[in-house]
Image (cartoon, rainbow, N blue to C red):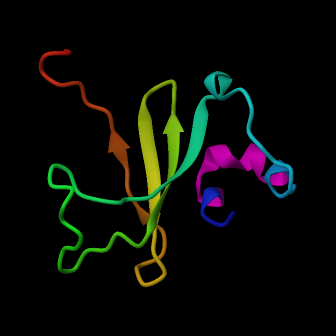
Amino acid sequence: MQHWARFPPWKPLAKHAKSPNFACQDYAQREHLFMRWKEYFLVPDHKVKSITGASFEGFYYICFNQRNGSVSGIYFHSRSEKYVNTPAKHVLSGQQR
């Protein structure tokens, strides 16, 4: 809950999210989707299991705005800096523009 609370769009859901039966419904109708992502490998070489100075042990807490396509996120790992922001924006490739 402490990670999701860092996203302003989470505020209306915070009270209900504390319920043990909480589940978001009607995903297609909501402006924001909240996800937790986990890295398992690197692209394009999925055989790489480690990189000096990097870790696959943490999680990304993601807020995706379905209306404008923006993605904001926070990376969390117990041994890393707290609340590392990871903003991202979808960019169309040259052929799709």
Name the residue at 66% across, 58% down: 5
- Quadrant housing residue 97: top left
Is residue 28 toward the left or the right of residue 22 in the image? left
| Relative depth, front residue between 81 and 53 | 53
Which percent across, then down, holds residue 56? 35, 69
The residue at the far front in this view is 47
| Relative depth, front residue between 19 and 88 | 19
How many callouts does the rendering have?
0
- Quadrant housing residue 85: bottom left
Q: Is residue 43 above or below residue 75?
A: above
Magenta residues, dominant SS class: helix
Instruction: Provide the residue span drawn in magenta.
Output: 5-15
Which percent across, then down, holds residue 48? 18, 65
Name the residue at 20% across, 51% down: 43
Which percent across, then down, holds residue 35? 55, 48
Is residue 26 toward the left or the right of residue 92 in the image? right
| Relative depth, front residue between 86 and 95 | 95
Name the residue at 63% across, 57% down: 4
The residue at the far bottom in this view is 79
Is residue 50 toward the left or the right of residue 5 in the image? left
The residue at the far left in this view is 94
Q: Is residue 44 above or below residue 6?
A: above
Image quarter of the N terminus: bottom right
Q: Is residue 58 magenta?
A: no
Name the residue at 23% across, 57% down: 42
Q: Is residue 9 magenta?
A: yes
- Quadrant housing residue 93: top left
Which percent across, then down, holds residue 32? 59, 35
